[in-house]
Every structure is written in C-alpha cells, then in structure tokens.
Amino acid sequence: MKKYTVFITSKIPEEGINLLQQQGYVLKFGSLKKAKGAHALLCLLTDTIDAKVMNAIGPQLKIISNMAAGLDNIDIHEAVKRGITFTNTPGVLTEAVAEHTVALLLAVSRRVVEGDQFVREKKYKGWQIDLLLGQELRGKTVGIVGYGRIGSRVAAILEKGFGMKVVYHDEHRNEIAEKNNAQYVSFRDLLKIADVVSLHVPLLATTLHLVGEKELRMMKRTAYLINTSRGAVVDEKALARVLKGNSIAGAGIDVFEHEPKIDDSLLKAQNVVLTPHIASASHEARIAMAELAAKNIINVLKV
Ligand code: GLV
C-alpha cells in the first residue's frame, strides 16, 4: 500500500490523530511552509490555503481537510482547478455554536458582562430598582438569517426554551422551517420585524457586508444583532457607529472582519458583548471536529 503523508498544521485532539495513525499514514506537523510533498492537509480556519500554498505543497496533494464548518479560508476555485478535494466539518459543531449564540444573546440582553464588571469594580452598594435593566425574550421575535443546521437549532432553542417567535430569511424557503412554524420573510422585513437578528450564513461574495449601515439602521432601536458566522458578513465600522448612536440596543459578536484585529471603535462600544471566535469551542465539538476531519482524509485517500 502507498505510504501517504498527512500534514497537520496544528495540535488537534488526539482522537483525530489516532484515527489517522491507525491507517499507517506518515503524520507531519508544523506550519504550512513545511507541508511540501503532503498527500493530505489537515488545516484550520486560520490557515489561508490559496493557489500559492497549493503549488508549494505540490501536485500530489489530494485533499484539503478543513477542521471548520466554514470554507472561506480556502480558495475553492483553485482547488477545483487542480482536482483537489476539500472538506469541512459541519454538523458536529452545531450544538456548540447554537448554544454560544444564545449565550451571547442572554449576555447582552441581560447585561451579564456589565454586571460582572460593576461588581468587580466594587460599585455594587446594594439592590437598586433601576440597576442594569435589560430586556426579556419571551414573546419577542428572532430573525434567523440562514436557516441551515446552526440557524435552525438556534431557532428551536429560542422558540421552545424562551417562547420567541421565529422568522427567517434564506436563499430559498425551507420546508423544515415552515413545519416548525418559522415564517419566511424578505431580508428587509426581517431587519424591520426582528427583536433579535441572528446571522448564520457562510462568508461568500454575496454575503460580504450583508449587514451594513443601511441594514443596521433598518433594525428596531430595541433590537440586538448576534453574529457567530463570519466577521465580514457585518460591516464592523458601521456596527460600531450604530451602537455608539444607540440606533440598536446592542450586539453579541464572536467573529470579526479582520480577526484577530478588532476595530477600536467596536472595542470602545459599551452595548456589545465580544468573544474571541469561540462559538464552536466546546470540548465535545473540538473532538468531533478532529475525528470528522480525519475521517474525511481517510475517505479520500482510500479510493
Ligand atoms: C468556526 O467558525 C468554524 O467554521 O468551524
């Protein structure tokens, strides 16, 4: 049997490594620069895999296995041109990302982070009737943008757990959504109706800055924006402006346009809860992602 080399750009959970070792592959680790000669590449969303990288690795490369749900770090047209298979790890991080989305929503709507700071700064001098008032979710409307695996799970948690009404927008109407009583609306109507706008679309040319200043200004003044998809889906500077002017009530943001850089104006905004791209960062999801990324490689190399 041919000895395949699998190049892994980061330390991933051992469950994934074990699966690859059981196949007898040669495993190599390190930065992308050292991947020359690999038959398979196991990479992360922080690795940019463009034509230059593919050329440097060489024509024997058969598969790029991205340990992420998104594929926006890979130039998929260049991969197709070269006949290289590319895979991602959808499904196994749905729960983690959906739960984090809800965590961000609750954190901003119930002012959890502000409360924590208030206590630590020793400002808490006793119960006050009007201290850090937030908004409840029950009976309000969540607008899901992108009713896929994660979007539909967020919708279910917020509907069943918190009594929210669900409207959604996607490229197409979704039968499951309709069965679940989620109402299809135009993107414009969603922005106008929703008390919470939650983004669950991949980053594509068509979703770049999908939410810009104009869209943000269509939202209710009392509404929240939650983004656990990709940073560039939102115009970050515009979001900071709109937050500063209190044109929306707040935001929960896990992903940034130029991460790990974050626009200063967003860092200064008070009514936003920021997390460092950790929506899928549960132990369960990371193990399952590593296993799936390994299985994707095995499936391609065995044919
Ligand atoms: C996380 O953002 C992922 O795409 O897996």
Image (tube, rainbow, N blue to C red):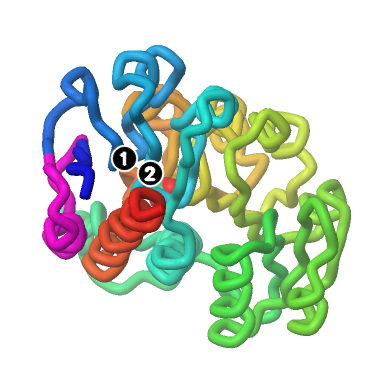
- Please provide percent x and percent y for residue 106: 45, 66
Rendered residue at 68%/63% (across/down)? 147
Residue 120 vs residue 85, the one in the foreground: 85
Q: Residues within 10 Å of mark 1 (few under 14, many from 20)?
A: many
Residue 295 is at least partly visible in this image = yes
Q: Earlier in the sequence, mark 1 or mark 2?
A: 1
Q: Is mark 2 within 8 Å of ligand 1?
A: no
Is 18 within the magenta?
yes
Question: How many discs mark residues in the rendered view?
Answer: 2
Q: Which mark is residue 243?
A: none
Q: Secondary structure at mark 2?
A: strand
- Please provide percent x and percent y for residue 168: 76, 63
- Please provide percent x and percent y for residue 117: 24, 52
Span highlighted in magenta in the image: 9-27
Q: Secondary structure at mark 1?
A: loop
The answer to whether residue 22 is above or below residue 234 is: below
Residue 279 is at least partly visible in this image = no
Q: CA distance from mark 1 to mark 2?
A: 6 Å
Residue 244 vs residue 23, the one in the foreground: 23
Rendered residue at 70%/80% (across/down)? 139
Rendered residue at 35%/18% (across/down)? 53
Asked if the residue under mark 2 is in contact with the one under mark 1, i.e. CB atoms within 8 Å, the reply is yes
Q: Quadrant of residue 107?
A: bottom left
Rendered residue at 47%/34% (across/down)? 84
Q: Which residue is mark 2?
A: 66
Left or right relative to 119: residue 150: right
Q: Quadrant of residue 210?
A: top right
Left or right relative to 178: residue 82: left
Q: Which mark is residue 44?
A: 1
